[in-house]
Image (cartoon, helix red, strand yellow):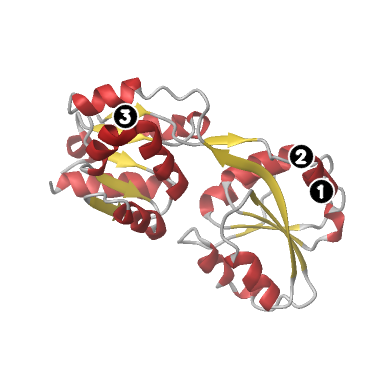
Amino acid sequence: MSPQVALAGLGILVTRPAAQSAGLMRRLADLGAEPLLFPALAILPPADPAALARTLAHLDRYDLALFISPNAVERGLAAVADWPAGLKLAAVGQGTAACLGRAGFTEVLHPAAEADSEHLLALPELADMQGRRVLIFRGEGGREFLAETLIARGAQADYAECYRRGLPPDADPAPLLAACAQGRLHAVTVFSAETLDNLYTLAGAEGAQTLRALPLFAPHPRIADRARALGVCEAIATAPGEDGLIAGLVEYFGHA
């Protein structure tokens, strides 16, 4: 079955921030789906911009700048006045590396397949970190596994927390709830566990119950695990990124 046939007429909920969703919305529509955009995550300025500025003032002291996400690339690079020559870059996944590429950085260390800290840390270039100084660009909070592992391998690891995640302050759940009530949604897509938590908060108890009954597609097993823990009827972990998510949707509905 062709992708166009598999997804024709299906209502697919897209929950990423609007600025990151245009490409995915277009691709789904081109395949005949009827995507509904409901951003369930807001990318906000850091709580302490002065602390970030103090850290970035000493960027030239580091050997490696490591970016966790496309948001870290966008917000982090915007906060840097002059990028030090010779500072090496790494990214957790292909999507983040592509964002750095679009900003002019062509040599970026990143895993070829899965987009997570474990696969990045498995690269031989990061096996011996003795004496190396690493600055991790990320949002506030999050997993400590990456920094802890680098430190255990001999590195000095610091954070440049260049954004924070939160509930969209102007979210209007009315269109989402109407689509749920009218049975116009057939699948939910999420790119982070926090987005999923926010989605259920914004949808309210009745809306969340309807959404949990729909198959959910997420480009990482940890997100799918979180969905199952929240009572989702069927959570499918796809291959990474938009390509993986779309392929997972096509495969699932092509055999439905």
Compared to residue 129, the image places residue 39 above or below, namely above
Q: Position of residue 235 (x, y in %)?
A: 27, 52
Q: Earlier in the sequence, mark 2 or mark 3?
A: 3
The residues tagged by marks 2 and 1 sit, at their Cα atoms, a distance apart of: 11 Å
In this rendering, position of residue 2 left or right of residue 96:
left
In this rendering, position of residue 123 left or right of residue 177:
right
Q: Residue at x 49, y 33 (%)?
A: 17
Q: Residue at x 86, y 59 (%)?
A: 61
Residue on which the image places disc 2: 49
Local secondary structure at mark 2? helix
In this rendering, position of residue 122 left or right of residue 212:
right
Q: Earlier in the sequence, mark 2 or mark 1?
A: 2
Local secondary structure at mark 3? strand
Residue on which the image places disc 1: 56
Q: Earlier in the sequence, mark 3 or mark 1?
A: 3
Residue on which the image places disc 3: 35
Mark 2–mark 1 CB contact (< 8 Å): no
The residues tagged by marks 3 and 1 sit, at their Cα atoms, a distance apart of: 39 Å
Q: Residue at x 23, y 29 (%)?
A: 180
Q: Is residue 192 visible?
A: no
Q: Is residue 63 visible?
A: yes
Compared to residue 66, the image places residue 241 above or below, namely above
